Image (cartoon, rainbow, N blue to C red):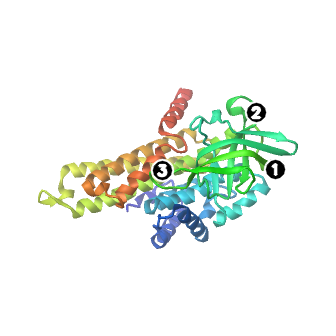
Amino acid sequence: MDRSFLDWPFFEDRHRVLAEDLEVWCGVHLPVDHGDVDAACRGLVAELGRGGWLRHSGGEALDIRALCIIRETLARHDGLADFAFAMQGLGMGAVTLFGSQVQRAWLDRTRAGDAISAFALTEPGSGSDVARTATTARRDGDEWVLEGDKTYISNGGIADLYVIIARTGEGDGARGLSAFLLPADTPGLEVVSRIEVMAPHPLAHLRLTQVRLPGDALIGQAGHGFRIAMTVLDHFRPTVGAAALGFARRALDEALGRVRDRRLFGAPMADLQLVQGHLADMALKIDAAALLVYRAAWAKDQGAARITREAAMAKLYATEAAQQVIDQAVQLFGGDGVRVGMPVESLYREIRALRIYEGASDVQKLIIARSVLEGA
């Protein structure tokens, strides 16, 4: 794979060492058997913890460039490994950025791979529109009582703890939300159903019925839940683009191998100008995506208070471009491209969800447009 991007000025020597070390680790441990997805995810979290990679998922500070390098590399080797790593960071993002000392004690377990985390934001009636969150949390003495449903929750059913966004009523819409830390063994938390999707991952619909939490389960301040959720997404949206970038790089690698080895009309496919045109388009999209992803990550690591616009651009372009790159790779493989078990077929299923979760592509366009209008 072309690794010349690591020489770009976005990176420091420690990032280059990280990339090389992780590449070696992936060559030994990945891919894994996806036959039992729950077991595979549990095993991956434990193995990533033993390897020390989850140290980057949370702690005193987040190195967004390191997170992006890790997600890109893992995604190129095994999409489920990327998922397992990403959810340890996203699931505990609110605790990393806003949690109390008591709450941050959980980070020792999630960073070691001894506990699995989840971020419960989406609801049946509010996906992209977080301000419409209907799950409620009301005070009852020194406790909070939570009621409501959450759906499409990654790691739902296997997580040891959840960050829950619920309505506490300090104001209308986004102003009346708060964030809570909910251990999975809390009475009243029910896994209503598991959700099967085209690229298998552990997903679930959760129901909270009279779930009682102590007062110190509140993350940050009451009424700050929307800001907490958006800040977490600001940090992690560039990493979604990085995962898409990893998928796209793998697709290009597979396509290059195919066109070099396959003969068509009496010559290698690579000699055909139409094929070369496809390869040029794929390489161009990959470099453009990488520049946007690592610009956003660099900006955050340099201390930018918000990277909403940069993160939206990185997430939008990288995921849309990766979909196109993978589609072109499938086309170059012909009939073999749609055979179950072929790497490009798996990539085709893996990439689709990235254009939806953590803010669908259409929502990213709205964010970018509003930023441009405000700037004007």
User: What x and y, as percent, mark residue 337?
Assistant: 30, 55
Residue at image mark 3: 197
Residue at image mark 1: 216
Three-letter residue code for mark 2: Gly
C-alpha distance separating marks 3 and 1: 35 Å
Q: Report if residue 156 is visible in the image.
A: yes
Q: Are marks 3 and 1 in contact (CB under 8 Å)?
A: no
Query: How busy is the neighbourhood of tag 2: few (under 14 within 10 Å), some, or many (20 plus)?
Result: some
Q: Is residue 107 left or right of residue 329?
A: right
C-alpha distance separating marks 2 and 1: 18 Å
Q: In front: 34, or 313? A: 34
Which residue, as the protein is rendered here, is positioned at the far left?
266
Q: Residue at x 45, y 67 (%)?
A: 31
User: What x and y, as percent, mark residue 230?
Assistant: 63, 41
- Nearest to viewer (mark 3 / mark 1): 3
**Relative height, residue 10 to residue 127 (above, below):** below
Q: Is residue 174 left or right of residue 238?
A: right
Q: Is residue 350 left or right of residue 261?
A: right
Q: Which mark is residue 169?
A: 2
Element at label 3: loop
Three-letter residue code for mark 1: Asp
